[in-house]
Image: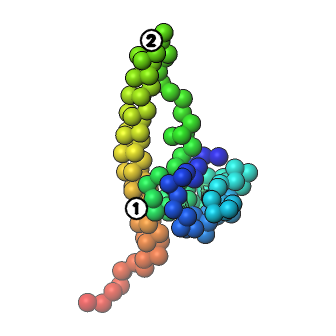
Amino acid sequence: MSYIITNQCIECHRCVSICPTGAIIQNEQKYQIDPERCNDCVGDYAVPQCWAGCPTNGGCVPEAILTQPLAVEASNDYWDTWFKIYNDLISRLTTNRQSDYWQHWFDTYSQALANQLQHTPTSVGVNA
Ligand code: SF4
Ligand code: SF4
């Protein structure tokens, strides 16, 4: 599974209707992605629809953001390790939030533009 629904989900139900494989399930008001059914929208869309269509900034995120290992090595000094981990997490959160926001914005905009171009008739032969 490449995407995860987090506790920032506001339960708007939008992703359920746009998922092409029916992978998003509702379990006691919580939404989850069934890893057996999710195929990252491959073959249906260029952009994962749950991520692109989610109205929140962090309700549906790539799994790698939450599961990537810490980039710090522990030392014998407790506080030295604590501050390294703290700085790594802060750096990751601020960097990911910014890059995800713009990636999300760009993917959504590209998808909407591609859809619009597909359905726009050509203007050849239009009389003035
Ligand atoms: S990535 Fe696509 S197939 Fe997977 S849960 Fe999201 S919308 Fe459904
Ligand atoms: S689209 Fe986002 S906020 Fe809405 S139900 Fe899905 S994960 Fe939650």
Residue 21 seen in the current view = no
Query: In the rendering, at what x and y percent does residue 117 appear?
Result: 43, 70
Seen as rendered, the residue at the extreme front is: 78
The location of residue 5, given as percent across then percent down, is 57, 53
CA distance separating discs 1 and 2: 48 Å
Image coordinates of residue 76 in percent, x first then y, are 48, 9
Residue at the right extreme of this rendering: 36
Is residue 70 shown left or right of residue 93?
Answer: right
Between 126 and 101, the one nearer to me in the picture: 101
In the displayed structure image, the side of residue 21 where residue 102 appears, left or right:
left
Q: Quadrant of ligand 2?
A: bottom right
Q: Is residue 89 visible?
A: yes
Report the residue at 44% width, 66% height from top.
Answer: 112
Residue at left offset 38%, top offset 33%: 91
Q: Amino acid at mark 1?
A: Tyr
Dot 1: element: helix
The disc placed on residue 77 is 2
Task: Pick the residue in front: 75 or 25.
Answer: 75
Viewer-closest of 19 and 82: 82
Task: Tell me which numbered mark, 1 or 2, is placed earlier along the sequence.
Answer: 2
Task: Indicate left or right for 128 with 63 as reference.
Answer: left
Q: Amino acid at mark 2?
A: Asp
Point 68% across, 62% down: residue: 28
Front residue (pair 19, 78): 78
- Per the image, label 2 sits on a secondary structure element best described as loop
Nearer mark to the viewer, of 1 and 2: 2
Seen in the picture, residue 98 relative to 127 is either above or below; the reply is: above
Residue 109's mark? 1
Q: Position of residue 125 (x, y in %)?
A: 35, 85
Q: Local crowd at mark 1 within 10 Å, few (<14), some, or many (≥20)?
A: few
Q: Residue at x 55, y 64 (%)?
A: 11
